[in-house]
Image (spheres, rainbow, N blue to C red):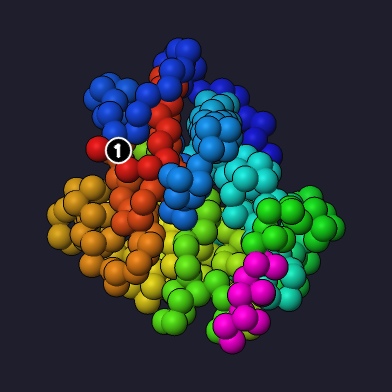
Amino acid sequence: MALGKRPSLILLAGFIMATTVRVDGQPPAQDRVVLVVHGGSGVLPRAEMTPEREQRYRQVLEQALRDGRNALRRTGRGLDAVETAIRSMEDSGVFNAGRGAVFTHDGRNELDASIMEGRDLRAGAVAGVTRIKNPISAARAVMECSSHVLLIGEGADRFAIAQHLEEVSPVYFWTPERWEELQKALREEERTGRRSGTDRRGAPDRPFGTVGAVALDPGGNLVAGTSTGGMTNKRFGRVGDSPIIGAGTYADNSACAVSATGHGEVFIRHAVAHDIVARMKYGKRSVREAAREVIGKLPKEPDGVGGVIALDAAGNVALEFDSEGMYRGTITESGTVAVEIYRVP
């Protein structure tokens, strides 16, 4: 979407050179968080994480934060911040969204995304797209250029192309790492006779790297967005929580903006994103209390069921997950960046 509006003088005045700090440190009250991102709760185990790979993850998260904040400074719109930050991660080839998305059982990349703004509860989503370079932009186009909320498959692709979004060959999304993950899953499936990629209850062996962002703009509007390739070896037209408003994404200015990552079927059944908002509105919980309660009550899975990022209208942040880690980061009005992967003691 076009981002060519005049810069916000308020945000320009607050700009300083950014430094990198830990996510667990809370920023000063006068320097509130304006953008939060995640790259999924399915982090590599510490034993498998090389210094070079960790540096790459951190670089991509930091770049997404800076790109999103720059968009916010240019236009003053949280929608632009969220779309830009997620596009940055979709283009990176690092996470399970856009280029670098996982493969279905049939060797395809089927992509899902959603976006929502909290002022008027407008939302847009796409599922199962295969030819749109940036699914998050397609989701925004559904919200702003149609009377619908969710479009799927070929219809979603054709709609996005009609809105002049960039079309690519499906080969664009192919990466060797994700292809090898599918081959490994297929070999395991043939060996055991069980659909690989899930445990006996249908839960993913490890939640994958869905990406998401939540933003607070100078006008007090909250925005949330999520984008994913789903789970390796998925089939039968499977759609998870990421494009489902209320499950993987939700924003309400009277509470908070939420983006989720993890086992999509669980997040759909428990309406996770909306549940966090509802606990704030009706139970008078803080954003951290609400997120912690919702993640804490989800069914337990060996490697964790997933996590959420959430941001309220005061710039308070919740980063809750029950796995070994979650790729995550924040940036404040002044440009202070914080990025983490594993749990902070």
In the image: residue 2, left or right of residue 53: right
Residue positioned 48% across, 13% down in the render: 17
Q: What residue type is labelled 1?
A: Val
**Residue projecting furthest to the bottom:** 193
Q: Circle 1 sits on which residue?
A: 344
| Residue 68, position as x, y percentages in the image | 54, 34
In the image: residue 105, left or right of residue 18: right
State whether residue 71 appears in this view: no
Between 207 and 67, the one lying in front of the other is 207
SS majority, magenta: helix
In the image: residue 171, left or right of residue 159: right
Residue 249 quadrant: bottom left
| Residue 258, position as x, y percentages in the image | 38, 53
Asked if residue 63 is positioned above or below residue 125 in the image, the reply reads above
Asked if residue 107 is positioned above or below residue 287 in the image, the reply reads below
Asked if residue 192 lies in the magenta stretch, the reply is yes
Residue positioned 42% across, 82% down in the render: 201
Quadrant containing the N terminus is: top right
Residue positioned 31% across, 56% down in the render: 322
| Residue 22, position as x, y percentages in the image | 35, 29
Asked if residue 268 lies in the magenta stretch, the reply is no
Quadrant containing the C terminus is: top left
State whether residue 82 appears in this view: yes
| Residue 272, position as x, y percentages in the image | 34, 65
Q: Give the range drawn in magenta.
A: 182-193
**Residue projecting furthest to the front:** 191
**Residue projecting furthest to the left:** 284
Asked if residue 275 is positioned above or below residue 135 in the image, the reply reads below
Q: Circle 1 — which element?
A: loop
Between 185 and 91, the one lying in front of the other is 185
Classed neighbour count for the residue bearing mark 1: other residues with Cα under 10 Å, few (<14), some (14–19), many (≥20): few
Residue positioned 42% across, 41% down in the render: 341
